[in-house]
Amino acid sequence: MTSTFPNISISTERLVLRPLDEDDVNGLAEMMNDEQVGAWTDVPQPFTEDQARHWITEYAPTERAAGRGLDLAVTEFLTQRLVGIVQLARTNWQVRSTELSYIIAPWARGEGYASEAALATAQWLFGDQKLERIELRTAADNTASQQVAQKIGCISEGVLRNACIAHVRAEDGTWSDVRTDFIVWSLLPEDLDGAGEELADSGGFTTFTDWN
């Protein structure tokens, strides 16, 4: 039987990671239309509110139910403002591994939210879900994403040559593809030692019983 991730909320000192809901449609669409998101991800440009709603109501629940992954909204604890997304994909329950990625909204960059959210997710995956490996892939020129990987204790394993398609926007607003390399990072349970403050044992996790 295929395993799946539970309905979960993960709390840190400043953030709450929770399932996406329809109240996130506007913020998600605005975040995904940022030029940096367009450059380093495969998110369609422009990204409409209808596409955001489809992601929230259909794509994310389907991926979780199928056991392939999990999409979590990253929100500020005090304001409840959407500041990013953490996504788990290509989960292999036999190997106990998953691929982690993160996007931070332009209005929330420079606050360390990406590393805080990624570290909290990794702690939950290794502790509660008993995973044994987390993999990250960053484009060769995406230094901000690489810094996040290093901050949470990831080890660079090598380069997948010419395996990534980045995007460049011209002055007229059109986008073109540019091939580049992927840097592959891994994180194992023992790599988290000294990576940051540990979450409180079970107090950092809250179950969502009403999310489908």
Image: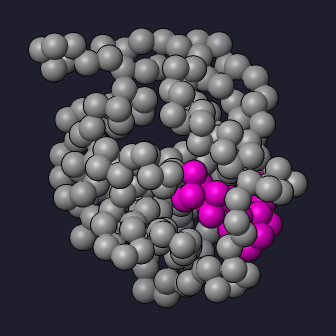
State the residue at coordinates (33%, 73%). 80
Residue 56 vs residue 72: left or right? Answer: left
Query: Residue at the spot x=54%, y=28% of the render?
Result: 143
SS assignment for the magenta stretch, majority = helix
The quadrant holding residue 1 is: bottom right
In the image, is residue 8 above or below residue 96? below
Does residue 38 show up? yes
Q: Residue at x 65, y 13 (%)?
A: 161
* x then y, percent, for residue 5: 61, 68
Residue that sits furthest to the left in the current view: 172
Residue 66: x %, y % from top left: 56, 61
Image position of 200 (left or right of 69)? right
User: Residue 177 location, x and y as percent?
Assistant: 37, 14
Whether residue 90 is visible: no
Instruction: Report the magenta residues as a range.
Output: 115-133
- Residue 25, position in %: x, y? 23, 61
